[in-house]
Image (spheres, rainbow, N blue to C red):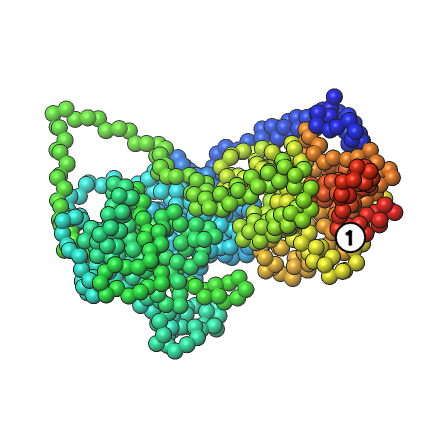
Amino acid sequence: MPFTGFIRPRSWKRTPADRGPWRAARAGILGLLALMLIASAGRLAEADTGAHVQDYLRQVTPEEIFPDADNFGPPEGTPPAVAAYKGHQPLGYVYLNSDVVDSTGYSGKPIRILVGIDLEGRIVGAKLVDHHEPIVLIGIPAAKLIGFIRTYVGLKFDQTPGPVVNGPPADIISGATVTTMVIGDSLTRSAIRIAQSRALGSAAAAKPAPPAARAVIDPSKGEVENWTALLGDGSVRRLALSVGEINAAFARSPTPHAADAPEPGPDSDSFVTLYAAVVSVPAIGRSLLGEDGFKRLAEELAPGQQAILVAGEGRYSFKGSGYVRGGIFDRFELVQGDRLIRFHDRDYERLGAIHAAGAPDLPEIGLFLVKPDSGFDPAAAWRLTLLVQRATGPREKAFLTFDLSYTLPAKYSRLVTPEPPAAPQTEKPAPLPPPAAHPPAPSATPLWMKIWRAKLSQVVILGVALLALTAIFFFQDALVRRPRLYRRLRFGFLTFTLFWMGWYAHAQVSVVNIHAFVNALRTDFRWETFLMDPLIFILWFAIASAMLFWARGAFCGWLCPFGALQELIAAVAKRLRIPQLRVPFGLHQRLWPIKYVIFLLLFGLSLYDLSLSEEYSEIEPFKTAIILDFVRSWPFVLYAGTLLAGGVFVERFFCRYLCPLGAALAIPARLRMFDWLKRYRECGNPCQRCANECPVQAIHPEGHINPNECIQCLNCQVLYYDDYACPVMIQRRLKAERRAAVTGAPPKSGPPLMQIKTSASVSD
């Protein structure tokens, strides 16, 4: 008995889709084995060892990577690098980041950058020489990525760039966050390893300096003071910027059009006033938080953890709204020496008021916790850097930074002189360890974990949505018996899919993800590559699981933002009584294989050249319509608009005939184990009601449902139980009413509109 027979009543009609399930399973398994053999062969053929720096150096001139250099030496050392010379004078080293650390991007291939580092450990040049990131190949201008890489030039090997005037930080490059985070992480880690292995700059071994006295917080010092006193002695620091100062600063900015849209209002108006203080210092904390508030804070703080109070007023919010979407406060950061600390939503607590006597009523007050392992010293000088942004175009922005400097007043601290280290024992000197040929990389949290933590709120929301969808499918019989609830729930879920998953979180999977996965199997598969985007990873896991139960319909019918956009547009068109075109079934059968041909062509092209297949994958309008919000060059917008216009007259036109992703999901979905959609013997002969009302024409005239085309919208199941729409149910209802009339029970009555639909459906 086939798997589907366990849950299908004998009264249901057996369909051609049910015949030979073991043959389909056997064919799928053989196909999977063939794919694994191809992948294994590809991995053996493309196994790659050794350094690549010499190959890419041939493509550039020495001055592009290392100013003043005129020749390079051969690759040497571990990790590999080449020496840069001016004549015979050594200047530093040039290396390829992917030779030193893992720099695999979301495409599954390394993002390769040539980097020059001088003898002092300072990065003097960096050039992007190879990448396969799909969002950058067509979509995000490469100039933005190059500008981001240039922010590392001039920094020491252990430094990271803060917000800059002429280019945004990594998380502001909309649509390329994962790519830029991979680049930044690989540049920093590779520079540290090269500097340590070559003893460059501060990484060189040096005699330890005698310990110097340093300030530490003395909890017993200080007393509770009012707001005026706290401002006066520097316990609370303030940064005040007026409208005139902001307009003048943007006028001096070299960013084009930065001064074209000045802040309105008098120059004397407040733009932003920012306050900051270290409230983990007991006296300051009691003054600003009150005795009870500081007591609660002290109980929450881990050993060595600090807390900063940041407050502001004016027309510009220091918090912004980015932390709601991405979990990161991207408008300010704490800088101390070469440390840069950014705060996440989990580090933040909103406060309603400041308890110090005479404190103003501020609209934005936040308590931010600094992690114990951040290295932050509250007794040393630090600054809060505020990022001010201004739109200069549809997607372009200009950026300026302003610093609020903070030094803890001496009255809260005391000086401590560390004990000098014990003198070495000379009578039995210990032998020095040999120099490490391969210095260990600095221990740090993996990048993918940082991304997951930053997007934890989005992960939770998506997880709840997937659980809700699972409940919809498992309890679909109870849902479809309530047509009004079903329609509200379906259109509500599609709205969530489009607006939150698509336009907000940009969680739109693509056939490019399949190409990247297969390419990773053929070359160097690493889970970390696919964990870089949490929402896409979770969606693919959910899609793979759902295909065993509901074929491709769970994704195509409920979780695809572009599919949701098409269906919502079609619903509006029907409301406006725009005529809907019904494609003759014979023509429809000849058109839907087009998407399979497109997928096979793209898949074959990806085995030959992944970058080229990513460019041709633009046949999917997902990037234009969902990822880039239609802000793109006109040919792409025109193409996406044309497909959506076709969907006004033929519902889900792109899904039916052109979508390569739908075709890719339909192929393995043949292995599904269950068939949840119920049918009657009369379906197809003589009744055609479900076939006529199927939004994607997935029901054949003879009555069976084509699982390759079905999007699991459950519309046919609503009709299945409707005793005023389904002829089989109508007959059962009429018999029940006649029996009720004989017994004297009141007959069941339905809404007049449904009765009118019934008479029309019977004639079908």
Which residue reaches farthest bottom? Answer: 266
Residue at horizontal 14%, vertical 31%? 424
Q: Quadrant of residue 677?
A: top right
Q: How many marks?
A: 1
x, y percent for residue 329: 40, 54
The vertical placement of 74 against 414, above or below, is above
The vertical placement of 555 against 61, above or below, is above
Could you tell me if residue 589 is visible in this image?
A: no
Residue at horizontal 28%, vertical 66%? 360
Q: Secondary structure at mark 1?
A: helix
Q: Nearer the viewer, residue 155 or 162?
A: 162
Left or right relative to 82: residue 467? right
Residue at which label 1 appears: 752
Residue at horizontal 33%, vertical 40%? 196
Could you tell me if residue 166 is visible in this image?
A: yes
Q: Quadrant of residue 513?
A: top right
Residue at horizontal 43%, vertical 53%? 323
x, y percent for residue 485: 64, 47
The vertical placement of 519 against 349, above or below, is above
x, y percent for residue 244: 37, 74
Label 1: how many Cα within 10 Å (few below 14, some 14–19, many 20+): few
Left or right relative to 396: residue 514? right
Image quadrant occupied by the N terminus? top right
Amino acid type at mark 1:
Pro
Left or right relative to 432: residue 54? right
Q: Nearer the viewer, residue 8 or 271?
A: 8
Q: Nearer the viewer, residue 449 or 340?
A: 449
Left or right relative to 96: residue 634? right
Which residue reaches farthest front? Answer: 744
